[in-house]
Amino acid sequence: MPCHDGFKFSFHVFDHPMSRGFQNRFSTQYRCYSVSMLAGPNDRSDVEKGGKIIMPPSALDQLSRLNITYPMLFKLTNKNSDRMTHCGVLEFVADEGICYLPHWMMQNLLLEEGGLVQVESVNLMVATYSKFQPQSPDFLDITNPKAVLENALRNFACLTTGDVIAINYNEKIYELRVMETKPDKAVSIIECDMNVDFDAPLGYKEPERRPQHQEEPTEEEADPSSYADMDLGFRAFTGSGNRLDGKTKGIEPSPAPLDPSDIKRGIPNYEFKVGRITFIRNSRPLPRKFVDDVRKVKDCIVHLLIFRLYVAVFTILTTFKSLFLILSG
């Protein structure tokens, strides 16, 4: 009976789809170097801006013989430090036995130049959510950080929780720690709809709010004495007087206390429109004599026009009469 159960267990292991995946899994070791060590005239600084590595041509030949899924995703492991991350592949142009990694990826794996790294092909779930923590408050100076991060992640193939990735923006390197990924701790971000969130940057301090010591007085609580420079209009018995004997004793003015109702307040412009400036000037009434003179001038002009109209009509009638007499004679 124990043998029978063991046989059934063995049978299911070898028949499980995962077992066939292990048989076709790519797994090998390479000596890793940073991209700056890559020989050739071409500048490969683009590798530093993403999360993909450069592998030798033999890896492509071996991968093409295996039944692996695309896109090609790999798990990188440093067995000496038990650190691991995930990445994609950019090209297969490295020397045999060597692979080239971005500098930030080597830092996450605690790898030195020429260190050994285990490269294994993996299948990752598509990302739905990720949360990042900037490693410096300088990241807050970016106007639209989500758009900048979205553009930078186009050069990445996957994300691993705990990694510190580096993005380049305006000739400056910003580091962000991957705090959380869903639905797994390692996810693929190729052709995905992923929600992005940010945690407070490392070392960020909330700005101190200054306490309001004294609130500004409202319109109802305003002190009427502050309206001394305003137009107060007419106020009876506020001046000083003179005695007939010329003495100044006992004639000091004693003005009545200022009543807020005596203050002339401005009338709001209810026809105000945004973007329009109106200059309101106080207009003084014209003198009566000037108004009468203008009226007389208008009357003269009207009489002159009527006279000229009469003359024109008389001339036309006279002309018609002359023509009639000539034609009838």
Image (cartoon, grey):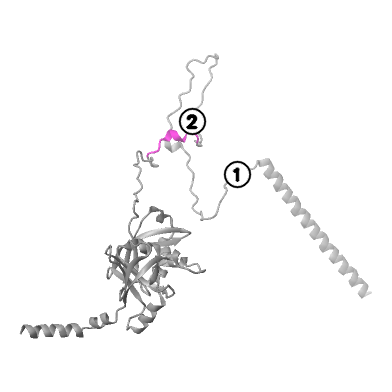
- Of 97 and 186, nearer the camera is 97
Q: Which mark is residue 310?
A: none
Q: What kind of residue is marked 2?
A: Ala
Say few, some or many: other residues with alpha carbon within 10 Å of mark 2 (under 14 / 14 to 19 / 20 or more). Answer: few
User: Which of the 4 quarters of the picture holds residue 77?
Assistant: bottom left
User: Can residue 185 be seen from the camera position used here?
Assistant: yes
Q: Secondary structure at mark 2?
A: loop
Position of residue 262 measured from the top left corner of the image (x, y, whole percent): 45, 36
The span shown in magenta is 221-229
Q: Secondary structure at mark 1?
A: loop
Position of residue 291 measured from the top left corner of the image (x, y, whole percent): 67, 44
Residue placed under numbered mark 1 in the picture: 283
Residue placed under numbered mark 2 in the picture: 236
- Of 221 and 263, nearer the camera is 221
Indicate the quadrant containing the N terminus: top left, top right, bottom left or bottom right.
Answer: bottom left
Position of residue 41 measured from the top left corner of the image (x, y, whole percent): 52, 68
**Residue displayed at 44% across by 61% down:** 168
User: Can residue 128 be seen from the camera position used here?
Assistant: no
User: Which of the 4 quarters of the picture holds residue 175?
Assistant: bottom left
Say few, some or many: other residues with alpha carbon within 10 Å of mark 1 (under 14 / 14 to 19 / 20 or more). Answer: few
User: Which of the 4 quarters of the picture holds residue 287?
Assistant: top right
Q: Is residue 296 left or right of residue 277?
A: right
